[in-house]
Image (spheres, rainbow, N blue to C red):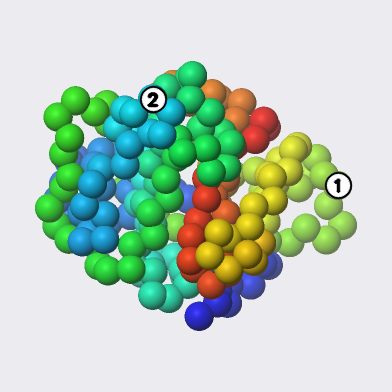
Amino acid sequence: MSMDVSQSEYFKVVYKKMKKSNEIISHSGGFPNVSSDLEEWPVCDSCDEEMSFIFQILSKDLPLPAPIEAMQLFCCLDSDCETYKPNSGSSKVHLSKVQLQKELMKPEDIDSLEQQSISLKKEKFETEGLSSDEKYEKYFCDKFYGEFVGANSPKKVECSHCSKELTFLSQFSEMDMDEFEEWFISIIQICPDGHEAVFQAVRG
Ligand SMILES: [Zn+2]
Ligand SMILES: [Zn+2]
């Protein structure tokens, strides 16, 4: 099933500090919940180290193509790895097609980012009559859907399964991502039919 979210709406990301918890919620940092379709912690192709967990978003909070239940983002934070390139092997967007389970994956020696809950606030995306500066001021934020707002455009990527062009799903830049370059905007693009999603980053 394809996504039916109108491009005139977006979901603004609101982060909130939280105590460590085993609850299954949309959150950044800390640890992901396990699903049976992701049994191994993702490892970076370039440096062979375990990637850092960035966030997980549940489909009850954000419309995602069925049958996706949750999306989890992992990135290598080693500055020598080319995480910013799409399909670099230094990032992984896991689209879980089964429900996340309570137990957390806990590799021994991985740096975890500060844990924050994520809630999503639905807003209209009105760009008619706005200059690019005004658009940047108003819509440059951590968000899902709407459209990408930034000085440089993301690279076009095709789905490796169906060859359709991946569509814009998300951009973020202000999360507490240790060692991430601040001038990068992180972007997730997704296949309209939900086969896969890909991470990349562009200069702001
Ligand atoms: Zn790496
Ligand atoms: Zn596809």
Q: Which residue is mark 1?
A: 131
- Side (left or right) of 201 relative to 55: right
Element carrying mark 1? loop
Find residue 47 and name its label: 2
Q: Residue 114, position in %: x, y?
A: 30, 32
Q: Nearer the viewer, residue 78 or 141?
A: 78
Q: Nearer the viewer, residue 146 or 119?
A: 146
Q: Check the image and report above or below for 89 versus 46.
A: below
Q: Earlier in the sequence, mark 1 or mark 2?
A: 2
- Side (left or right) of 85 relative to 33: right
| Cβ of mark 1 under 8 A from ligand 2 | no
Q: Check the image and report above or below for 69 versus 204.
A: below
Residue 96 sits in quarter: bottom left
What quarter of the picture does the C terminus occupy?
top right
Q: How many residues crowd mark 2 within 10 Å: few (<14), some (14–19), many (20+)?
A: some
User: Residue at coordinates 67% horizontally, 30% vertically from top-left?
Assistant: 203
Q: How many residues crowd mark 1 within 10 Å: few (<14), some (14–19), many (20+)?
A: few
Element carrying mark 2? loop
Residue 167 visible in the snapshot: no
User: Residue at coordinates 27% horizontally, 69% vertically from top-left?
Assistant: 98
User: Residue at coordinates 75% horizontally, 37% vertically from top-left?
Assistant: 151
Q: Are marks 1 and 2 in contact (CB under 8 Å)?
A: no
Q: What amino acid is found at the position of numbered circle 1 in the picture? A: Ser
Q: How many marks?
A: 2
Label 1 to label 2: alpha-carbon separation: 42 Å
| Cβ of mark 2 under 8 A from ligand 1 | yes
Residue 31 sits in quarter: top left
User: Residue at coordinates 26% horizontally, 61% vertically from top-left?
Assistant: 37
Q: Residue 191, position in %: x, y?
A: 56, 64
Q: Residue 146, position in %: x, y?
A: 64, 60
Find residue 19 and name its label: none
